[in-house]
Amino acid sequence: MIEVDQTIFEKEQGNCFAACIASLLEVNIEDVIHFPPGTASDWRMIINEWLSEYGLFYLELSLPGDARDEHVKYWGWHIISGLSPRGTHTRHAVVGYQGKTVHDPHPSRAGLIGDDFTYGFLVCTRRLER
């Protein structure tokens, strides 16, 4: 994982999610499709179509805190989405590892607030070569 920062900051239009994808794929943010999740009703289909060229699929989970705590030690790299400290009801995305934030792509590095998180994983869809 390389730390890639977001470059667009307008409310509801930022590219924090694209920065997280770029960080996990270790590519430039300009190489990642940009659309603010939540602005397109089919955003998961859009990102998965784009990720298919990498042999990946974006899978999101929402778990209650007690269930989450039992499993995070097995989680590798992922994207955590939750409420931003910069605005009421504004969602933000950060890179996580084992359930903890390891990179906030916003320059403030303020992370997420609350505990209403979703966890997104890049799942391999191709057979791995040995």
Image (cartoon, helix red, strand yellow):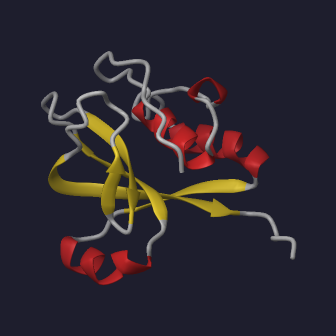
Is the residue 48 above or below the residue 55 in the image?
Answer: above
Is the residue 32 above or below the residue 45 in the image?
Answer: above
Residue lying at the far right of the rendered structure: 129
Picture quadrant where residue 28 is located = top right
Q: Position of residue 66 (x, y in %)?
A: 20, 79
Q: Position of residue 82 (x, y in %)?
A: 26, 47
Q: Nearer the viewer, residue 105 or 121?
A: 105
Q: Nearer the viewer, residue 97 or 39?
A: 97
Q: Position of residue 126 (x, y in %)?
A: 79, 64
| Residue at (75% x, 55% y) in the render | 55
| Residue at (29% x, 84% y) in the render | 70
Residue 64 vs residue 39: left or right?
A: left
Picture quadrant where residue 49 is located = top right
| Residue at (41% x, 18% y) in the render | 8
Residue lying at the far front of the rendered structure: 2
Is the residue 115 above or below the residue 17 in the image?
Answer: below
| Residue at (32% x, 15% y) in the render | 10
Q: Position of residue 100 (x, y in %)?
A: 30, 61
Residue 71 vs residue 130: left or right?
A: left
How many marks are shown on the rendered structure?
Answer: 0
Picture quadrant where residue 115 is located = bottom left
Quadrant containing the C terminus in the rendered view: bottom right
Residue 98 vs residue 115: left or right?
A: right
